[in-house]
Image: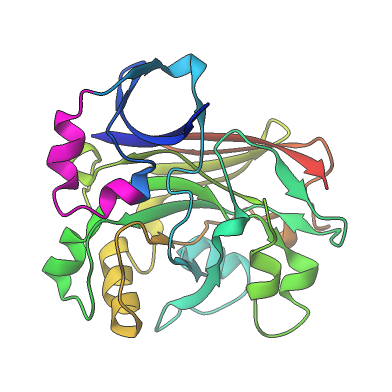
Amino acid sequence: MRLATIRTAEGTRAVRVDGDRYVETGFGDVGELLARDDWRSLAESADGPAHAAGTAGLAPVVPAPGKIVCVGLNYRNHILEMGRELPEHPTLFAKYADALIGPYDDIALPAESDAVDWEAELALVVGATVRRADESRAAAAIAGFTVLNDVTMRDWQYRTAQWLQGKTFEGTTPLGPVLVTPDELPGGVRPELAISGAVDGEEVQKSSTGDLVFDPVALVRYVSAIMTLRPGDVIATGTPGGVGHARKPPRYLADGGTLVTEIEGIGRLENRARRS
């Protein structure tokens, strides 16, 4: 099953994606739908107003998650690219919901930064409340997967040892276009999918989500040991090699530039960078 959040004249709506049709589920967004214990059956049986896919704008698939937990240095090739050793534990940081934009919205290039970088990522969306989850409960808590680009202000990220300030500038992080349930993906809750990123038409990142050091189930277990995860929460699982900051010389997003992020079997983000 595929779910999305669309924008309508009356506000956002959670929809089931049926080919080229979006069928309303009766909920305001995917996060609100996931808050129901029976969200799967509600989404499968929904028969609300339908919209042609080409006429409905897409919002972030979860517009206002309670938590956005991000994982740094979680692809083997990216870790080696950055000159680091494989980690014993996940490196965690956070974003806030104000950073999120839709899958085709413009990225706000902040006037305060001259080093705006890209990070193509697989994101998991939580579909059940869990704390201190074992492996089976962690797997069951994954509602599905979507695409995220952790657009990063490198000059702000490395001002201090704490990364948050470079990671959560408003209007910078596309999320979508859809949530795909694990049963539709090879590997299920541990999907092995091609992931790529392109800047101005040039492919700059290419890998497989099978290269993750800590897979989605392991991340739910780890994060839920720290805090309660709730429906609609998002965990961004990290980026593969090919980021602009690691290039010699470094390369960053420019005003008017395009950023395309794609994960096999899930979908594609297409965003233009605009100086804010």
Q: Is residue 266 visible?
A: no
In this picture, residue 49 sits left or right of residue 234: left
**236, above or below 199, in the image:** below
Q: Is residue 261 above or below residue 154?
A: above
In this picture, which residue range is highlighted in magenta? 32-47
Q: From the top left corner, tell me how far across and down residue 187 is, in percent.
A: 22, 48
Closest to the observer, 180 or 84: 180
The image quarter containing residue 111 is bottom right
Above or below: residue 220 compared with residue 226: above
The structure residue drawn at horizontal position 71% and vertical position 72%, both measured from the top left corner, is: 157
- Magenta run includes residue 34: yes
What x and y, as percent, mark residue 167?
64, 66
Whether residue 219 is visible here, answered yes or no, is yes
Number of marks in picture: 0
Q: Residue at x 16, y 43 (%)?
A: 40
Along the line of sight, the residue nearer the viewer: 230 or 187 = 230
Where residue 215 appears, as percent x and y from the top left, is 32, 64
In front of the other: 29 or 69: 29
Classify the position of the N terminus by image quarter: top left
Residue at image coords 51%, 38%:
59
Q: Residue at x 30, y 66 (%)?
A: 230
Magenta span: chief secondary structure = helix
Does the magenta-highlighted stretch encompass residue 244? no
User: From the viewer's perspective, is 245 left or right of 19?
Assistant: right
Give the colour scheme shown. rainbow
Point out residue 55 in the picture as x, y percentages from the top left corner. 50, 16
View extreme (front): residue: 10
Quarter occupied by residue 78: bottom right
Left or right of 192 on screen, residue 1 = left
